[in-house]
Image (tube, rainbow, N blue to C red):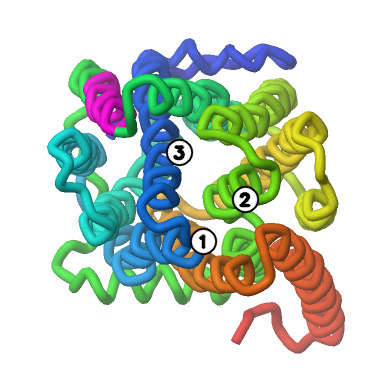
């Protein structure tokens, strides 16, 4: 387990969490790696459109990349709770690095075909299924509970700061040298986080989990905990609905940019970068708040606003306005995601953290294939704007359903009928 320094962070200082040695290494390594990840994400979407010009086939690749999380997330959480995090992360990061290098070679050799991209996206999805819960459970080991909110917000700033540069850089690299270099640079970027993991100062302790039990037994224990904890259940339910339909930006943004706004790869990249600008600004503000625990009403409001802006994007016909809108979407998306993550991690006990975060990953990413296929089919049938209408509309409906369920459970609790779900 990583050693978290017992240091109090000054209120209003979003960077006080960098006093933790291991977290500094983790943050800088992730920053470099995430820039490469966003380069590959943008490059993969554009390459699929170049090869097929099909929104549905792009949605199918997205499904291939996220479907493994549906099958492996629960097992991955149990593995994260019963093993040391660093060696597990070394394996997953190395796997993703090799996947990027193989994709680069296929492009450079001229052999790349749609089925190659689909298979490699599946491999990437399997690695991410084990990587994400381990990384999320690792954060509190690096910083402790006091700095958890700031660390989660700054982790979001990593992803979204990389979103500023990664897609734009990918667009420029692809325009000048081709998609292969975007994938190759992503492969190189994994060396930064691998180096950071190797340099961390870790204790020799291991998670105290009853390893004599089966992994499946441990996975079911995590599911039962989520069912009993109403607050976590409601957070994850809304997260799953929003993640499945509203947050398919890697699918709907390139289709809108290319087919409705007439943009090149560079124009698409700048739209994704604008989303990152808003997210980074919001993450720094949220990190300054410190240890405040978000309530359900805050999550519902931010989810509704995010869905409403997504719906409004369907009516945008001018590229500068679309870029501006993406800034606000990025800010709201970041606030919603960081608040949801904190709401779960503040509540869950340490010995169940990996399993609960694997369920978090499952509901946020594992069921995305359903949304990707649905939105891809809608855009193929009704045009690029139909994806935004569908995403935003379903998002608003989802918020209404969860708010209604919250009120129903509150009445049930008031009547003394228990608080468990199911």
Tags 1 and 2 touching, CB below 8 Å: yes
Front one among 209 and 239: 239
Left or right placement of residue 411 versus residue 3 in this view: right
Q: What residue is drawn where x is 80% and y is 72%?
A: 397
Front one among 237 and 269: 269
In the image, residue 351 lies at what x, y percent?
Answer: 37, 54
Q: Is residue 232 visible?
A: no
In the image, residue 421 lies at what x, y percent?
Answer: 63, 81
Label 3: element kind: helix
In the image, residue 16 lies at what x, y percent?
Answer: 58, 12
Magenta residues span 180-192
Discs 1/3, front = 1
Q: What residue is drawn where x is 29% and y is 66%?
A: 72
Label 1 or label 2, whichever comes before in sequence order: 1
Q: What residue is drawn where x is 67% and y is 28%?
A: 274
What separation in Å lies between label 1 and label 2 (alpha carbons)?
A: 10 Å
Label 3 or label 2, whichever comes before in sequence order: 3
**Residue where numbered disc 2 is placed:** 259
Residue 55 numbered mark, or none: 1
Label 1 or label 3, whichever comes before in sequence order: 3
Left or right placement of residue 243 versus residue 69 in this view: right
What separation in Å lies between label 3 and label 2 (alpha carbons)?
A: 16 Å
Discs 3/2, front = 2
**Residue where numbered disc 3 is placed:** 42
Label 1: element kind: helix
Query: Is-magenta flag for residue 185?
Result: yes
Residue 231 location, quadrant: bottom right
Query: Is-magenta flag for residue 380?
Result: no
Q: What residue is drawn where x is 22% and y is 63%?
A: 210
What separation in Å lies between label 1 and label 3 (alpha carbons)?
A: 14 Å
For the image shown, how many numbered marks are present on the structure?
Answer: 3
User: Which part of the image, by quadrant, shows the N terminus?
Assistant: top left
């Amino acid at each position: 387990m990583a050693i978290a320094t017992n240091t109090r962070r000054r209120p209003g200082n979003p960077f006080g969490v960098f006093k933790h040695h291991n977290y500094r290494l983790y943050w800088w390594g992730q920053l470099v790696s995430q820039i490469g990840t966003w380069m590959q994400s943008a490059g993969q979407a554009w390459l699929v459109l170049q090869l097929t010009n099909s929104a549905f086939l792009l949605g199918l690749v997205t499904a291939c990349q996220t479907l493994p999380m549906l099958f492996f997330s629960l097992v991955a959480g149990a593995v994260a709770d019963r093993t040391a995090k660093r060696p597990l992360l070394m394996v997953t990061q190395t796997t993703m690095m090799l996947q990027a290098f193989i994709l680069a070679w296929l492009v450079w050799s001229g052999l790349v075909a749609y089925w190659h991209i689909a298979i490699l996206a599946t491999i990437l999805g399997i690695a991410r299924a084990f990587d994400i819960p381990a990384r999320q459970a690792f954060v509190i080991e690096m910083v402790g509970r006091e700095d958890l909110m700031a660390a989660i917000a700054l982790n979001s700033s990593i992803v979204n700061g990389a979103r500023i540069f990664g897609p734009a850089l990918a667009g420029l690299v692809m325009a000048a040298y081709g998609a292969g270099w975007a994938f190759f640079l992503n492969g190189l970027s994994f060396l930064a986080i691998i180096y950071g993991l190797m340099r961390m100062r870790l204790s020799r302790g291991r998670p105290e989990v009853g390893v004599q039990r089966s992994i499946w037994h441990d996975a079911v224990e995590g599911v039962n905990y989520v069912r009993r904890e109403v607050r976590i259940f409601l957070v994850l339910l809304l997260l799953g609905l929003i993640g499945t339909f509203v947050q398919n930006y890697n699918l709907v943004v390139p289709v809108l940019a290319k087919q409705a706004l007439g943009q090149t790869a560079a124009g698409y990249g700048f739209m994704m970068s604008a989303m990152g600008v808003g997210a980074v600004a919001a993450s720094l503000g949220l990190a300054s708040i410190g240890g405040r625990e978000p309530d359900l009403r805050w999550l519902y409001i931010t989810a509704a606003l995010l869905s409403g802006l997504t719906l409004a994007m369907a009516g945008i016909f001018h590229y500068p306005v679309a870029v501006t809108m993406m800034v606000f979407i990025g800010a709201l998306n970041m606030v919603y995601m960081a608040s949801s993550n904190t709401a779960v991690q503040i509540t869950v006990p340490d010995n169940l953290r990996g399993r609960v975060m694997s369920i978090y990953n499952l509901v946020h990413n594992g069921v995305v294939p359903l949304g990707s296929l649905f939105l891809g089919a809608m855009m193929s049938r009704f045009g690029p704007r139909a994806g935004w209408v569908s995403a935003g509309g379903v998002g608003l409906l989802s918020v209404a359903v969860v708010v209604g369920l919250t009120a129903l459970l509150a009445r049930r609790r008031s009547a003394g009928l228990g608080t468990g779900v199911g």
